[in-house]
Amino acid sequence: MTLTHPTFAKRLNQDYWLYVVFNCATQPEVHPIQDPAKLDWEAVMRVKHYQVGADQILLANQGDN
C-alpha cells in the first residue's frame, strides 16, 4: 500500500477492500480483505525513485544505431 491507502481505508472502513494476489506467475490466488485498516500495518523503508530526461534517453538510443 502507498501512503494514501491507509488513510482512505480508515475513512471508508467496511467500504474499502484490498485485493491481495499470491502466486501471480503460476496459480494466482486472490484474497479480498474488507476493511484492511484493521490489520497491523507496519511502515517500511521508502523506495528511491530515479528519473532521467527524455532527451538523454533519445541521445543514448542514437548511439546504439
Image: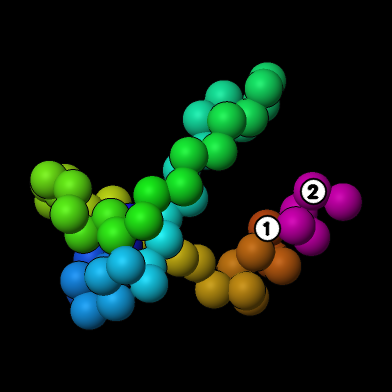
Amino acid found under the numbered disc labelled 1: Ala
Q: Secondary structure at mark 2?
A: helix
Q: Are marks 1 and 2 in contact (CB under 8 Å)?
A: yes
Residue 9 shown left or right of residue 50 in the figure:
left
Residue 19 shown left or right of residue 10 in the figure:
right
Query: Residue at the location (41% across, 61% down)?
Result: 17
**Compared to 21, does 32 lie above or below?**
below
Residue 60 — which label?
A: 1
Q: Residues within 10 Å of mark 2 (few under 14, many from 20)?
A: few
Query: Residue at the location (60% across, 68% down)?
Result: 56
Q: Secondary structure at mark 1?
A: helix
**Compared to 12, does 44 lie above or below?**
above
- Residue 28 % position (x, y): 63, 30
Please name the colour scheme applied to the rendered image.
Answer: rainbow
Residue 34 shown left or right of residue 60 in the figure:
left
Majority SS type along the magenta span: helix
- Residue 19 % position (x, y): 48, 50
Amino acid found under the numbered disc labelled 2: Asp
Q: Which residue is mark 2?
A: 64
Query: Residue at the location (38% across, 72% down)?
Result: 15
Residue 60 shown left or right of residue 36 in the figure:
right
* Quarter of the picture holding the N terminus: bottom left
* Range drawn in magenta: 61-65
Query: Residue at the location (72% across, 67% down)?
Result: 58
